[in-house]
Amino acid sequence: MSARGFLDLASATEAALIVAAQSKDQRAFGELVKRRQGWARALLYRMCGNAAEADDLAQEAFIKAWNKLGDLETPAAFPGWFRRVAVTTFLMAKRRQKAVFEEIDDASPVASEDSTPEAAAGAKIDLERALAKLSDAERMCVTLNHGEGLSHSEIVDLTGLPLGTVKSHVLRGTEKLRRMLEAAP
């Protein structure tokens, strides 16, 4: 808090911002969005494979979070709670779109750890292109498992998919990625 009783947004902890936002402080929530938008957009981009769609989904997820922030019991739970909001937003969008699963084409190989920055950037692009070639369900499960570090059971809790389906999507999606990224041009 500053001398005038206002929260200093730039130096406030995330927990303080959440408490203020739960009291409908739009400036505090704006700071939360500013801090979390890069992560949210990256997560959603990895799941949908389209930058513009990821931006729209992130915005929609933040609006849902603002409207439901009162449901959050503990500020420390915000990262996982917001991840659930973002993933649910993605799933609902996919249901609305009735997406058709994509076929797999060849992709360029991934750069090694000792690669130049240009090669590493190319490898990231290769990975993003390969992820885009997975089915929506495989891409989502692989992203949540490998990209976000969630366990199969956490993905089940988050998505509502059966455990066997999650395991299958992670296994098949990972194998498809491996084949695409190891393929020589």
Image (cartoon, grey):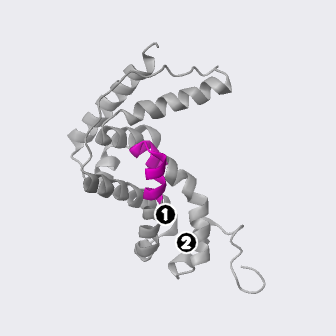
Residue 65: give x, y in percent of width and height: 44, 68
x then y, percent, for residue 30: 59, 70
Q: Is residue 43 above or below residue 185?
A: below
- What amino acid is found at the position of numbered circle 1 in the picture? Phe
Question: In the structure shown, which secondary structural element does the residue marked by tag 2 occupy?
Answer: helix
Which region is colored magenta? 43-58
Q: Is residue 31 left or right of residue 178?
A: right
Question: Residue 48: x and y, percent?
Answer: 39, 45
Tell me the residue that label 1 is attached to.
78
Give the structural element (helix, strand or loop) at label 1.
helix
In the visual, does 140 lie left or right of 111? left
The quadrant where residue 80 appears: bottom left
Q: Earlier in the sequence, mark 2 or mark 1?
A: 2
Q: Residue furthest bottom?
A: 4
Please provide percent x and percent y for residue 40.
50, 54
- Write the residue at 57% across / 52% down: 38
Image quadrant holding the N terminus, namely bottom right
Asked if residue 54 is among those painted magenta in the image, a careful observer would answer yes
Taking depth in this image into account, of 46 and 71 the one nearest to the observer is 46
Q: Which of the two residues, 52 or 160, is positioned nearer the viewer here?
A: 52
Circle 2 residue: 18
The amino acid beneath tag 2 is: Ile
Residue visible at 51% across and 22% down? Answer: 110
Q: Residue at x 39, y 21 (%)?
A: 106
Q: Which residue is the extreme one toward the top?
A: 184
174 w.r.t. 58: above or below:
above
Contact (Cβ within 8 Å) of mark 2 with mark 1: yes
